[in-house]
Image (cartoon, helix red, strand yellow):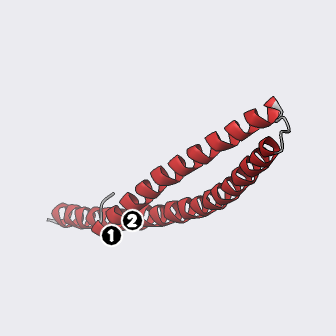
Amino acid sequence: MLSWLTERSRRRDRREDFARQDEQARRTAETLRTIHLLVNSNLMSAQRRELESTRGLLAAMQEVIEVKRSLGIAVKPETLVTVSQVDTRVIELARELELRGADQRQGKAGQIMGED
């Protein structure tokens, strides 16, 4: 009888331990999801600022090229290469932001719906 009571007590203790561990794991996962969303949000803000400033730089460079051409001044090949690279960077940043935004919206939706 004593061993039965002892075993019953141990099983109850194990169930309580498992329940505590499950709750701790749930809270940890929730905290990690929150941290991920915050880091992703900060990164997106930085990328948006970079995109805006790169678009401004590209517009200014293109305008200088137009002015030079209208005045009959030759544009250096290196300048054209740089403009092409900046244009490519604008496209890449816009694509990265679009993908990151979609991932973040999906992550928030999953968090709201309680998905892991």
Residue type at mark 1: give it. Answer: Ile
Residue 108, x across and y down, in percent: 39, 65
Q: Could you say where residue 44 lies in the image, as x and y percent from the top left?
A: 57, 59
Q: Are the residues flagged by discs 2 and 1 in contact, CB closer than 8 Å?
A: yes
State whether residue 66 is above or below residue 3: above
Q: Which residue is mark 1?
A: 112
Residue shown at the point (20%, 61%) measured from the top left: 3
Mark carried by residue 103: none
Farthest residue toward the right?
Answer: 73
| Few, some or many residues within 10 Å of mark 2 (<14, 14–19, 20+) | some
Q: Which element carries disc 2, helix, strand or loop?
A: helix
Image quadrant assignment for residue 109: bottom left
Q: Residue 98 or 29: which is nearer the viewer?
A: 98
The quadrant of the rendering that contains the C terminus is bottom left
Question: Is 75 rendered above or below residue 5?
Answer: above
- Residue at 54% of width from left, 59% of height from top? 40
Q: Quadrant of residue 70?
A: top right
Badge 2 amino acid: Lys
The residue lying toward the viewer, choosing from 13 and 41, is 41
User: Residue at the front extreme?
Assistant: 71
Residue 89 placement (x, y as % from top left): 64, 43
Q: Nearer the viewer, residue 31 or 40?
A: 40
Q: With 66 as the anchor, is 35 left or right in this view?
A: left
x and y percentages locating residue 68 in the rendered image:
82, 44
Instruction: Name the residue carrying label 2.
Output: 108
